[in-house]
Image (cartoon, rainbow, N blue to C red):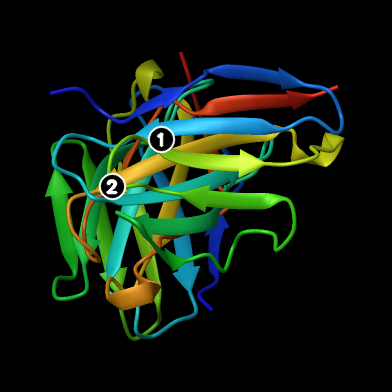
Amino acid sequence: NAGVMQNPRHLVRRRGQEARLRCSPMKGHSHVYWYRQLPEEGLKFMVYLQKENIIDESGMPKERFSAEFPKEGPSILRIQQVVRGDSAAYFCASSLTRGNEKLFFGSGTQLSVL
Amino acid sequence: GENVEQHPSTLSVQEGDSAVIKCTYSDSASNYFPWYKQELGKRPQLIIDIRSNVGEKKDQRIAVTLNKTAKHFSLHITETQPEDSAVYFCAASRGTGTASKLTFGTGTRLQVTL
């Protein structure tokens, strides 16, 4: 039973480019959460999705950031026109059902913006 | 929204001693309180969690206590070992509807010395 899979593990982009981060939840999990972690800091909530629906995007910047979780395929966190401040570790987590459930995290994608 | 504060930010103990990490939360409707351990460069891993209908939970050397009246919860690690060295995060959530996302504390770096 594979855990939460994220790819790539490391992503380097130049300022102004686009970054696409992928997350495949654990088998049977239909709820996906994205968190951002800056060095020496905690995990900041970005967005919560269920298949084909964004449930809560209150932590995601209004511009340049978007997320989706299609019926088929992985969840995608997309950052357009990246800036240096976007450099961080982006973690995806999944849960079996909504609320009161354990979150299982992927290994994260380390985004570096040059 | 929910706000979780965590103390101390760093903690150094000698092997065999106990370690205690404390968190407070602001949303009285929060009812799920997990603790995650994150080793350097690795994913956060759930080590123990507690729901609001119990005051204490124990799993071998790890225990968590919850005081709903005071809105604080604590992680206790007894007989610490070098492999306990990591960053520990507390979190809280309401567990229902759109508020089911976890809000994390800022982390405690635990160093277990020989």
A55 lies above or below A29: below
The residue singled out by tag 1 in the image is B44
> Which residue does the image show at 41% across and 35% down from the upper left?
B44
Distance, label 1 to label 2, CA atoms, is: 27 Å
Label 2 Cα crowd, 10 Å radius (few <14 / some 14-19 / many 20+): few
> Which residue does the image show at 12% across and 23% down from the upper left?
A1
Tally of numbered tags: 2
Image quadrant where one finds the C terminus of chain A: top right
B67 lies above or below B20: below
Q: Find residue A101 and report its image quarter.
A: bottom left
Label 1 Cα crowd, 10 Å radius (few <14 / some 14-19 / many 20+): many
Kind of residue indicated by mark 1: Pro
Residue B1 in sight here: yes
Q: Find residue B67 and report its image quarter.
A: bottom left
Closer to us: A101 or A80 = A80
Chain letter, disc 1 residue: B
Is the same chain shared between marks 1 and 2? Answer: no
A83 lies above or below B8: above
Residue A37 in sight here: no
Q: Position of residue B47 (x, y in %)?
A: 27, 40
Give left or right: position of B76 versus A40: left
| Badge 1 element | loop
Kind of residue indicated by mark 2: Lys
What is the number of the mark on residue B30? none
Closer to us: B62 or B102 = B102
> Which residue does the image show at 72% across and 18% down from the upper left?
A12
Q: Position of residue B105 (x, y in %)?
A: 53, 56
| Badge 2 element | loop
What is the number of the mark on residue A71? 2
